[in-house]
Amino acid sequence: MLQILSLALPFFGLIALGYGAGKIVKIDESGLRWLNTFIIYIALPALFFQLVSRTPIEELANGTYIATTTFATYAAFALAFAVGAFVTRGDLAQATMQGIAGAYSNVGYMGPGLTLAALGPSATVPTALIFCFDSALLFTLAPLMMAVAGSGEARLSKTLLSVVKKVFLHPFILATLAGVLAAATGFRPPEAIDRMLNSLMGAAAPCALFAMGVTVALRPLKRIPVELPALLTIKLVFHPLLVWLLLAWIGGFDPVWIYTAVLM
C-alpha cells in the first residue's frame, strides 16, 4: 500500500497544488490558455513521439491487444451513454458527454507517468497503444454522436469530414504516427533535438496535472448530478475489470501488458 501511495500521491499532489494556486492567486481562466497550448501542442506530443519511436515496430503491431482494449473502452462508453440517456430521458447530447465521462480515462496526463513508474520501460508499448486508440475512438464517437443529436443531413456530412480531420490532424495522433514511422525506419533525432524532446517529455505530466487542478478551482462543482455515482462506478470499476477479464480470457499477453491496461 505504501508503494502504491508513493506512486500515486505525487500526481494528486500536483493537482492539489494547481487547485490551491487557482484558489489563492486571483487570475482568470484566460491565464491558462498558453499553458494548455504548451501541454496539448508541444509537451504531450513530444512525450508520445518519444514513447513510440523507441519501441521495436513489431511490438506495435499487436492487433488483438488493440482490439480488446479499445472494445473495453467502447463498452464503458456505451454503458455510460445508456445511463445518461435514461437519466436525461433521451437527451443524446447530454448522454454523449456522460458517455465520455464514464469511458475516457486519464490516459494522456496520468497514464504514462503511472504505468512507467509502476511497471518500468516494458509498459511503454501498451501505454502508447492504449493512448492512441482510445483517443482515436472517443475523438470520433463524441462529435459523431453530437451530430446525431442535432438535425440536418448537411450538418452530419460536414461533421463526418470534420471528425476525420480532427482525428488525423490532432497533435497527439500526429505525434504517435510520427513515432510509429520513426520506429519503422529506425530514425533517431539528432542529439540536441532528442534532449529537447526529453525535456518536453518530462514537463508534460506535471504541467498538465497542475493545469487540471487550476481548472477544477476555477470551475467549482455547483451540484452533484444524480448519475455521477453510476458514471464513476463504470469508469473506476467496470472499465478496468472488463479489460482485465477480456485480456485474461483471450490469453497470450505478457502480464505487464495486462497490468498496464488495468492501470490505464
Image (spheres, rainbow, N blue to C red):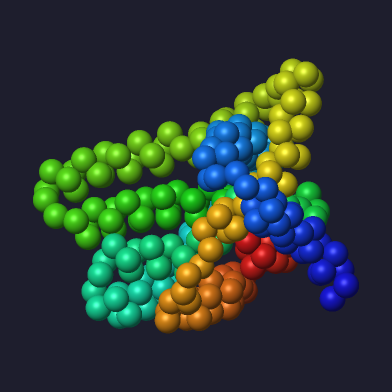
Going 71% across and 24% down the picture, which residue do you hit? 188
Going 37% across and 50% down the picture, which residue do you hit? 140
Instruction: Judge whether residue 180 can be spotted in this image.
Output: no
Q: Position of residue 257 (x, y in %)?
A: 68, 60
Q: Is residue 90 left or right of residue 176?
A: left
Going 76% across and 32% down the picture, which residue do you hit? 199
Image quarter for residue 191?
A: top right
Q: Is residue 185 left or right of residue 7?
A: left
Q: Position of residue 41 (x, y in %)?
A: 55, 33
Q: Position of residue 127 (x, y in %)?
A: 65, 53
- Residue found at the far right of this picture: 2
Please state, as top left, top right, bottom left or bottom right, where the C terminus lies in the image: bottom right
- 180 and 161: which is toward the camera: 161
Please state, as top left, top right, bottom left or bottom right, where the N terminus lies in the image: bottom right
- 159 and 33: which is toward the camera: 33
Going 32% across and 51% down the picture, which residue do you hit? 143
**Residue 16 sits above or below residue 26 on the image:** below
Q: Is residue 147 left or right of residue 208?
A: left
**Residue 180 sits above or below residue 64 on the image:** above
Image quarter for residue 118?
A: bottom right
